[in-house]
Image (spheres, helix red, strand yellow):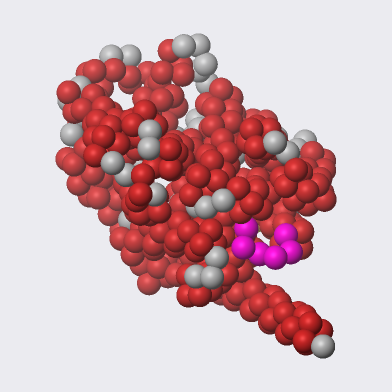
Amino acid sequence: MPRPAADGASRAEARSGTRRDLYAAGAAALLVTVAVLVGRHIQDTRHTLFVHWPPVLAEWDPHVGPGTPAALLLAVAGVAYGPPLAARLPWRGLLAAAWAASTAWILSLALVDGWDQGVASRLTNRNEYLRVIDRFHDVPAALRDFTHHIVAGSPHPWPAHVAGHPPGATLTFVLLDRIGLGGGGWAGMWCIVLGASACAAVLVALRALTDETLARRAAPFLILAPAAVWLGASADAYFAAVAAWALALLALAVTRRSPAWAAGSGLLFGLTCYLSYGLTLIALIGAAVLLLGRTGVRPALLLALLAGLAVVPLAFTLAGFNWWTAYHLLVTRYYQGVGGTRPYGYWIWANLACTVLITGVATAAGLRRTGSALAHRTDPARTRLALLVAAALLALLVADLSGMSKAETERIWLPFAMWLLPACALLPRPRPWLTAQAVLALLLNHLLLTGW
């Protein structure tokens, strides 16, 4: 009678794994609680955090709005039908459905704050990109002159977000304006729709590098991620999508030995670096992709990757913009502002609490499973998934240690967070964890008025 004993041992092991998952989720929730309490004390007594609801940039403002019914409906439908649909849909149909569902989830959450406050005005406030559209009437001249306006105290300094990013970010919205899609509404929808596509990009990479089953298990978690609260009308959603597709094309290149995909990946990697300085750390995830696809890496593929990678930097350099000079001036600007006052000792760990809020407690449990998969390596596909997630976590930790991301990481780290979410594919019972993710997103959006 060995089978009942074996089944009993298997059930006991499963229960033990579930308990450890709950411990990891509880520890993540505790981290957020401590970050809120300690942050409130520091802000109330020292006023050095410059956020009203630490650790996130938000105001306490319980409210409902036009997007509330749709958000509730999508949450219920996603939990009830997401896992079986993800398992059954044809692969291309799943990618299209995931993009559409992610767009609907992000937009419904944004509309909880109404169209104007939730979408149209997010990119038009005093620190945002649309404030300087008229200064780019001569694009080549603006690029040549860009570094002269980064440091505070220089003539006509750029707003914070324009100064804090390479000009590729601002130039995107300038080009939208030039083709007749000007204003906050078009800019907001650009970020929402493209940001939602990051979900499909991650699925493409997972299928190529791990296996289709794990990619399908990850799909509902990528769609219902709490990160959707900040993917709505934040330019970082656009950055996350470009970075995600760069990695997805690289995954296709190394698994299909395709120089064309490699060149496309390089082109998007180059663009990523000219959208945000900090996204150079995406290279760590790219290195993991190359490692996982090492048998498909050939000299022709690497040459195509490098050729594509050179295009955007070369174009901006020839136009007169020096990336390295701008980055060093940005560091000066960062410490001239609130970045020089915000305490590193708090944000070094409170940033991680922000990560919990954008990835959810399910991801914390998934990261525990990630560590287990790396330690035991009994399933090759799960081990490969764990390596990819670990690379994303490493990139995020390097960004944290740099001290250049003190606060506001709920939006700044969206490109890294998208690659932590696949850890949820390792969880054995998806629906309870999906419920936790959706509930967290709904609470965040209805109790807080976020800054992005």
Q: Position of residue 388 (x, y in %)?
A: 45, 56
Residue at position x 46%, y 19% from top? 176
Does residue 401 belong to the magenta stretch? no
Residue at position x 71%, y 77% from top? 14
Q: Position of residue 256 (x, y in %)?
A: 43, 38
> Which quarter of the rendering shows the C terminus?
top right
> Relative to residue 276, is residue 39 depicted above or below?
below
In the foreground, 447 or 249: 249
163 on left or right of 323: right
In the foreground, 381 or 409: 381
Does residue 428 belong to the magenta stretch? yes
Q: Position of residue 310 (x, y in %)?
A: 23, 31
> Relative to residue 79, is residue 311 depicted above or below?
above
The magenta segment is 425-430
- Quadrant for residue 329, please give it: top left
Count the labels in the image.
0
In the foreground, 168 or 215: 215
Q: Position of residue 104 (x, y in %)?
A: 70, 35
Q: Is residue 110 visible?
A: no
> Relative to residue 15, is residue 274 depicted above or below?
above
Residue at position x 46%, y 16% from top? 177
> Which quarter of the rendering shows the N terminus?
bottom right
Q: Is residue 424 visible?
A: yes
> Relative to residue 107, is residue 398 depicted above or below?
below
Residue ranking furthest to the front: 1
Residue at position x 71%, y 45% from top? 86
- Quadrant for residue 369, please give it: bottom right
317 on left or right of 69: left
168 on left or right of 422: left
